[in-house]
């Protein structure tokens, strides 16, 4: 046995009575990571729905400018995207500065930026595709700014979270149509102008199939679509029976490509429509009812205005609910105190 055998080779130190100071730079990094927004899961149905929406819009625009017959200049989608995506990034930076947090697109590299910009990408392409302003681009740019920017302004306390309630692309289009009477919706032949007659029937079939699969599997908006279509048919029958409107003319919009695009890709917007099946059905039915009322007053661009009014009413409903709950919360402590 040597002298070193009786001496332990390791020793246990008692914990210090104070914590070692953390360098400010490391503390700042730790705080930044703690405030980092959650990462979007690539298997999340909401992300998959947005991704498929974006892919559908991209393919439809490419085919529109090369095959179908879109009449807007081919450079306009790129101009519109630069405005819409740039504005979305600016809103994210301003929101982060105001809340002293990380931007919603930061923390996950290209993936975070890509998932953050998907809604603005869809809104921008939809606005540019559906509006027609002759050779003037600035009304299109204004519609993009309104559609993307309103999400930071027109918000309501929905289920404990501040969320936007106006359908972005629909609201941008509707606001521009109200502001400028000479701006129009893309004409019906816009989607089939250069397609041979034998293939024209394929375009609605493809859109109907793709939209049905998307809304049945990912967005789960089939009840909303059923409510909308059912109310549309009922209002057509009522106008035919009570106001002597030709039934064929009242139902004819359902055969157009624009109606299919609206039904499968606009009125079903996941961010501004209810999630429960019953509420979805009521939302879609409300759009159909408002559409019928507006038609009785000979309002044009009825699809867009009906959707905007229903979304506005839904936002007002959430604000009223929030105000009523606050009033109850303020009255309850006073009522519990003894007289």
Image (spheres, rainbow, N blue to C red):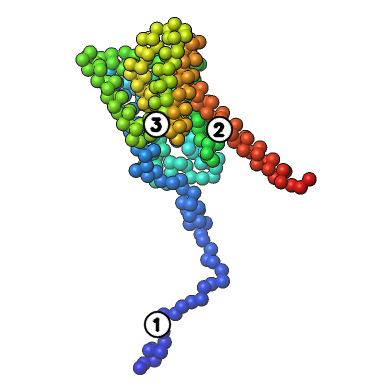
Q: Nearer the viewer, residue 172 or 242?
A: 242
Q: Position of residue 139 (x, y in %)?
A: 45, 18
| Residue 206: mark | none
Earlier in the chain: of badge 2 and badge 3, it is 3
Q: Position of residue 322 (x, y in %)?
A: 59, 36
Question: Which secondary structure, mark 3?
Answer: loop
Image quadrant in which you'd find residue 126: top left
Question: Residue 9: which numbered mark, if any?
Answer: 1
Quadrant of the rendered image containing residue 218: top left
- Calculate the distance from the C-alpha at mark 2 to the C-alpha at mark 3: 21 Å
Q: In terms of secondary structure, where does tag 1 sit? A: loop
Name of the residue lying farthest toward the bottom: 1
Instruction: Tell me if residue 7 comes above or below residue 208 in the rendering.
Output: below
Q: Nearer the viewer, mark 3 or mark 1?
A: 3
Question: Residue 169 at what x, y percent from top left?
Answer: 43, 25
Distance in Å between CA atoms under marks 1 and 2? 69 Å
Quarter of the figure with residue 40: top left
């Amino acid at each position: 046995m040597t002298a070193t055998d009786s001496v332990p080779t390791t020793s246990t130190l008692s914990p210090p009575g104070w914590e070692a100071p953390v360098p400010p730079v490391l503390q700042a990094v730790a705080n930044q990571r703690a405030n980092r927004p959650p990462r979007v899961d690539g298997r999340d149905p909401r992300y998959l729905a947005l991704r498929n929406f974006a892919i559908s819009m991209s393919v439809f625009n490419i085919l529109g400018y090369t095959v179908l017959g879109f009449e807007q200049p081919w450079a306009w989608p790129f101009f519109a995207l630069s405005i819409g995506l740039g504005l979305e990034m600016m809103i994210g930076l301003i929101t982060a500065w105001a809340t002293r947090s990380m931007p919603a697109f930061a923390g996950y590299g290209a993936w975070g930026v890509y998932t953050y910009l998907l809604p603005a990408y869809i809104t921008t392409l939809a606005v540019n595709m559906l509006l027609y302003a002759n050779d003037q681009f600035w009304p299109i740019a204004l519609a993009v700014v309104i559609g993307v920017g309103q999400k930071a302004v027109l918000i309501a306390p929905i289920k404990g979270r501040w969320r936007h309630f106006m359908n972005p692309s629909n609201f941008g289009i509707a606001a521009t149509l109200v502001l400028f009477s000479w701006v129009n919706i893309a004409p019906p032949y816009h989607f089939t102008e250069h397609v041979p007659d034998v293939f024209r029937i394929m375009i609605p079939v493809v859109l109907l199939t793709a939209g049905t699969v998307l809304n049945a599997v990912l967005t789960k908006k089939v009840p909303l679509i059923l409510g909308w279509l059912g109310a549309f048919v009922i209002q057509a029958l009522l106008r035919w029976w009570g106001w002597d409107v030709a039934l064929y003319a009242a139902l004819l919009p359902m055969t157009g490509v624009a109606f299919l695009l609206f039904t499968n890709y606009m009125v079903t917007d996941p961010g501004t429509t209810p999630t429960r099946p019953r509420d979805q059905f009521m939302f879609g039915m409300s759009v159909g009812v408002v559409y019928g009322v507006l038609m009785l007053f000979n309002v044009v661009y009825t699809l867009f205005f009906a959707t905007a009014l229903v979304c506005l009413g839904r936002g007002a409903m959430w604000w009223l609910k929030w105000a009523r709950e606050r009033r109850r919360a303020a009255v309850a402590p006073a009522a519990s105190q003894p007289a």
